[in-house]
Amino acid sequence: MARARKKNPIRLLVSAIVLFEAGALLLIAFKPPSVNLEALILAAALPLLCWISTMLLPKLFPFDQLLMALTNFLCGVSIIILYSMLPEAGLRQAQFYALGLGTMTVAIVMVRLIRGWRVLSWLMMPAGIALLALPVAVGSWINGAKAWVSLPWIGMFQPSEVVKLAMLLVLSWFFSARRSLRRMMPAVVFIVGCLGMLLLQRDLGTALMYYLTALVLYFVSTSNVLLTLVGLGGGAVAAVAGYMMFAHVKVRVAIWRNPWADALGKGYQIIQALMAIGSGGLFGLGLGLGLPRTIPAYHTDFIFAVICEQFGIVFGLCVILVYIALLVRGFSIALRARQSFYALLAFGCTAMLGIQTFVIIAGVIKMIPLTGITMPFMSSGGTSLLSCMTLIGLLQGVNSRIKVDSEQDWAIAEASEEVEPT
Amino acid sequence: MKELRRNMSLIAAIVMGLFIAFFAYFSYSVYFYGGRWFANPYNPRLNSQKQAVREGSVVDREGAVLAYTDEEGRRHYAEDTATRRAVSHVIGDSIGNVANGVETFHAQYLLGFKTNIVERLLQVFQGGERRGDDIRLTLNARLNTYISNNFPSGQSGAVVIMNYRTGDLYAMVSKPDFDPNTIEEAKEGQDASPLINRATQGLYPPGSTFKIITLAAALDSLPDVRSRTFFCSGKLEVKHSVVTEAGNNVHGNMTLQEAFAKSCNVTFAQLTRELGYDHMSRETGKFGLGDNFLFRDLVVYNSEYPTDNRSDDDLAWSGLGQGRVLVTPLHMAMIAAAVANDGVMMEPRLLMRVTGPQGQRRLLTGAKEYRTALTPENASAIRADMIATVASGTGGGARISGYTVAGKTGSAEAVNDKTIQPHAWFVGFIDDPKHPLAIAVLVERSGSGGQVAAPLAKKFLTKALELGL
């Protein structure tokens, strides 16, 4: 009895997630007319990955299990939803999820092992700019942006998702050395270069993410309210200029103000999303039911609307609560970090995830104008999922460093105590 | 490090704040608009659900069938052509040619989206087909048919009769109408736009019926207004325009009640100028102008009292319900109903009962107050003025022997052209707790309210009394 009571609450949470994933996928697998073997395999593989990553990785190094469990839940929901609508996308997402767990582990190990990020930061800057320049040079226009490159073997690849990580590392490194603007200059030049490339790609949503994250990191590390406000003001001016210059920004704003004015034309997308949310009601129409495919971009930007249609608004709000819990976890890691570089890194990762999630879901429910960016962990898309999993890896890396550092502190303290009495 | 942690906490709090705002906004918009997002003709789920579910039927308050689906899945409407046409706008059609009829706006019931899991299982075990919920409306089909048959032929307009104590809509007729069985023909002849429900979507200048609100504003803000004597010389010069009387009358000296009963434009234009935009917009707001109507049972277009162009001329004319003031006939009926109901405006109700396939009742909120428009004292004062209007003023045509009828007429000019007849309005009610009926009659471009609309109101109210409402 006593043993059962002492059960780790994480174990309970992971069991619930595993049951949810297996149950949902079995439901899809045994849906008439025939048994779907693929879904059966997924129904075994997905819970297994969830269990291994949450319960076994802590045996290797200090690890935040709750953060991992929440991440697993979000990825699981995404794979289930995608598989029910579009099996190939679901399978692809599952493969990238497995791969993402790998890159996450690599990121943890890197943060634990690498002490000097100086050389790496200097190397990452030109590499990042070059990567961002790639789609401008050889990319093709998709949905009004030139953000993707088609690579042999890998398929479509979005450099800005990878450079995101480099940007966080570079900014954290240079801003942690801090104090003088002169010493931060290389990072500022780098971020301006990134923004320039993103504007050339016409990927305004991603540019917005980069800009806000950089600004937040700058403020946090320097406490310079004045320059931060100037930066915000500059952003606002740029937004207005974008509104004036780009016709599609104007259209976005007009749709946001009244999508019903052109319900079958420009407002079609957002109206389909709102209708999907309204149709789901509190508890949803049920997995695989409803007509989620009528929403354009249902598997990427608008996946939140699909979740609300199938699982209901209550579930949708729960998903948002999971994001909030994940952010709280990330911020708490940042606050516990011993060195400013690690604090800034953890904080940057969390802030970026938070801003990105908010910007897309608030756009889907017409709270703010829609910006075409992906929903972290949820949207179908390999690069996006990989980069989000790697972000979690960076967070976990910082977390495990904190543990190592504090254990060392303890050891030193204990050693000195032992010495003192003599 | 300490400063860094403080800054990080601050930004973290801001990000959390964003998510709290998201929660609030999402809950708010789903609560108020979720039903509207779902129930619109662009929603492809409605049509796809029809393949799987037999749509429920719609009956009037006495049980007369207005719409049902037969075993083969074909939708039928009332058998009698006159009835079918009389309720055509309220019922609407399931393809969404008519915006926000019961067939689309309440599709969540009719198509069984409200069926819960237990009921679904019951249906599966009973082996029957899936069925949607049946709806009983507050309408009285016989009254609607009578109104439709007795509306001046060839004219456009709308009639609303409602219970001012509960908000139940007994009749809502819009002209011209159409036959749902031949809706394609109605779609092609675009001229008189028969598919528009003029009672809920027609925005008209209210004309002198608006003086009810001007009077309420005066009673609210000018304490001595009852004891004043007003003088009408037949015209009042404002900056760029001249307010005149209907038929070039000169009313001379009068009390406020006489001015209201005679519908004296000069007096009310003067009062409006004295009140100013601030008092006027506060009062119109109390009556729901400029409000976003989000009624649960039906969609009503929002009425307007614009104050952005604050010119003296606009102000003077606005008190007479002219210029840029716009209301729907249903809203005018609600305004009259508020006066009758001691100042409390009830939310209009169209659904009387919704029943699931196994006979279980769906939960509907009952009669609900929409807003308080008047204090009880002001309501009874205006009630007396409206009774006087029918007893000895412009509303004489609406008198019904044996009942106390209260009302206000209006002749609203929609265009600046004297050769075109004004819209004829009558709004009013029967002052009798056993027959709490409020009415709004509008006949487009047909003449003065006293001559055209008031006698119609008398006819329709008499019929409603006959039917025991």
Image (cartoon, rainbow, N blue to C red):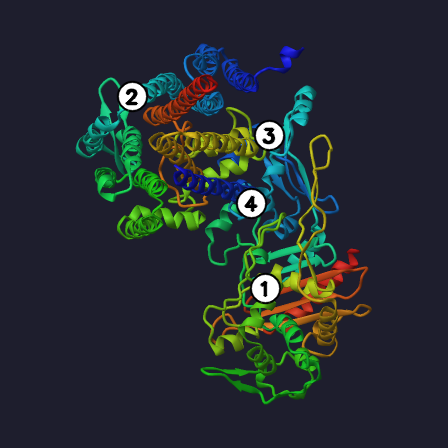
Q: Residues within 10 Å of mark 2 (few under 14, many from 20)?
A: few
Spatial CA distance of label 1 from label 4 is 22 Å
Q: Residue A303's spot in the image, x, y percent?
A: 44, 31
Q: Residue A317's spot in the image, x, y percent?
A: 53, 34
Residue type beneath disc 2: Ile
Q: Residue furthest left?
A: A137
Callouts 1 and 4 on one subunit: yes
Going from the N terminus, do you reach mark 1 or mark 3 first? 3
Q: Residues within 10 Å of mark 3 (few under 14, many from 20)?
A: some
Quadrant the C terminus of chain B occupies: bottom right
Which residue position holds label 4? Answer: B28
User: Which secondary structure, mark 3?
Assistant: strand
Callouts 2 and 3 on one subunit: no
Which residue position holds label 3? Answer: B53
Is the residue under label 3 in contact with that under label 4 (CB below 8 Å)? no
Going from the N terminus, do you reach mark 1 or mark 4 first? 4
Spatial CA distance of label 1 from label 3 is 43 Å
Q: Is residue A398 above or below residue B302?
A: above
User: Which secondary structure, mark 2?
Assistant: loop
Spatial CA distance of label 2 from label 4 is 48 Å
Spatial CA distance of label 2 from label 3 is 63 Å
Q: Residue B460's spot in the image, x, y percent?
A: 71, 62
